[in-house]
Image: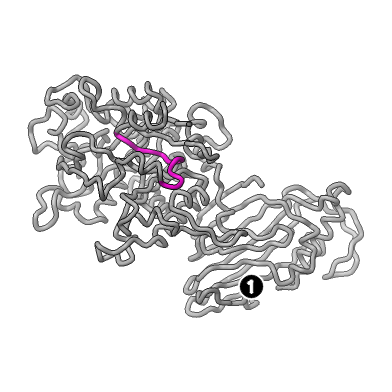
Amino acid sequence: MKILKIVCGFGILWLLSMTLMGQTTISIERPLSTAKASSSKHKNEHGIVLGNVAGKQFTITLKAETEDNIQFGWLYFCIFSPINFRTHNSKLVMYETQATHNSPSNSEGYIHDYQFNASYSNGNPYYFYRGFIAGDQICRSNAIKPDQRKFFKNQAFTTRWNIPWVKWLDNTVDVKITLTFTGDLELTDFEKIVIPGVGTLYWDDFIDKTAYNQDHGCDGASDQLCDRIANVREPNVNGTTDVIVQAHRGVWGKPGTNQENTLGAMQAAVADGYYLLESDIMPVNVHDGGAYVDAGSGLPSDLACFHDFILTRYTSETNNANRVYNRSRTQLKALSLKEPRSETNGSEKILMFDELVDYAVSTNSIVCVDMKNLESKGADPNCTELCDWQDQSRKNESLYHNLKYALNNTTEARLKHIAVKTYAAYDDLKTNLTTGSNAVSESRFNKVLWAPMLAPAPQWRINPADSDSDFDPDKIKAHLNGWFVHNESVLYYETNFFNDFDDKSSVMLDNSYCKISSSGQQCYNIMEYIYEMSGRRAGIFSEEPVGGKGTVNRWGKWKIKNPVSDRRGDHLWLLSQPYFKYAVITTDRPDLWDQLNGN
């Protein structure tokens, strides 16, 4: 039985994804059969099938181009012109089509002024774009020949006869398939793409399961840090247990050892073989114009590895008015932390975020950031603290301020040591961090990895306004699909289900997550769906009670969890769930998980 230890809290495919002014460009490599491409059977079997895109405006360009230069010096017949003799030494466009859809009020759309076909599937409209543009690389023709297959057939014949004889017998060439789209389209809107000689592609074929963002620094690299990251990103799905254990806030809590979120807890984790170092991160010295305030800008002056807003639970602070967010770094460093399970002040000090990153760099570890934001204590009319931060938009504002501070105040070379847990959609995350005041540069944004989280949230309910409404797997799936498109920036995905019977979070364990492939529709639970679509692990925070009082929130309020409705601390039940044996486990009890896994 295989178990890997990590500490954290939360053909060959080639992918280039670029989003600029609403344009997305994605490329993959595939072999193309020139014999199949030149077959007459493709006359009506090529193009792009889109899902229900009623009301969307967009343009699409699809091109398949040879990866290597093709040598030509032959007499050959072109359908569009008389016999020609041309010397040709360049890459060849084997297939190309373009489409526009600019009338959202109806199903009107065009392929360079040629109307497309609209059909219906299971009562839902979908749109099938066919056609191609005749290129000028061989026959020097710019004519538009929609749906006549002459362009790709001619290119296929020409290529087939002008490559070496042995290659001709194999009759394949490597092509780069480039899909570019603008407007309201998402990659998930493409149900399938049919290219003569290549076959049928589905949108998840355009997801790279191994590459990193080009700015991250681990794509193609092999060193201790990158190998550790790859170990998390790419599970060994071969039937054996490949669980990764993450120790929540380090290894801490036993009397006479380390307090949570301290340097000692992180050192103990690394000594025990865990190398993803999770920590709660709190804003320090939140100010507006230099004064400590509850409202205002919410801009931090520093970040601390600390869970609570209050300081009295496990520090030497006795003044209840003093909080993490209204103290300076110097003031926090002057405090002593209490010894675990004790009211006695010990020798450990509050660890700051930059100090944690320094330690991670020195040990080739990863800092997994559970970034906290300002939020009120209580709600109107009973709010008592941080009352200007009740609204979710203000909470998000605080969160993005804190993330901007973390990314802008870490040297670029060290950013690859950071992974950030987030509930946000990728596009929202990037937009909010790379724009506005104190914006993070795109290269900095790309250097960190992200751990998208899926906790039960109102927006994923069938009726968001009804707290008793069941969760809608299609809404959860749509959130995941949005992240899959940016899979090169993902460390792993963290789910959060409580049991298998409540018809709410248990929907994650149902086979409600489906994909269409050449084998037809296949459905999975959420953990297997994540792997099938992205090649990444799913994970969960098992959240065992850390003491007799249970677990504590940011304002020091304790809660005993109901082990019937919340089974995340039931280790054997978790391991019995399909595909969980490849999960990332965030836990306060790594020692128990080690015993369960035979270590």
Q: Residue 554 at what x, y percent from top left? A: 19, 42
Q: Residue 191 at what x, y percent from top left? A: 56, 64
Look at label 1 and name its amino acid.
Answer: Ile
Q: For this rendering, which residue is in front, 138 or 238? A: 238
Q: Residue 483 at what x, y percent from top left? A: 45, 52
- Check disc 1 and report its element: helix, strand or loop: strand
Q: Is residue 595 magenta?
A: no
Up the image or down, 345 lies above or below 559; here it is above
Up the image or down, 102 lies above or below 354; here it is below
Q: Is residue 321 left or right of residue 130?
A: left
Give the residues drawn in magenta, as a range: 577-588
Q: Residue 36: tell me if it is visible.
A: yes
Q: Residue 441: tell me if it is visible.
A: no
Q: Residue 178 at what x, y percent from top left? A: 63, 56
Up the image or down, 85 lies above or below 581; here it is below
Q: For this rendering, which residue is in front, 125 or 84? A: 125
| Residue at image coords 63%, 72% | 111
> What residue would you read off at disc 1?
111
Q: Is residue 582 magenta?
A: yes
Coloring scheme of the render? one colour
Q: Is residue 213 left or right of residue 464?
A: right
| Residue at image coords 30%, 45% | 567
Residue 379 falls in which quadrant of the image? bottom left
Q: Is residue 481 left or right of residue 219?
A: left
Q: For this rendering, which residue is in front, 503 or 285? A: 503
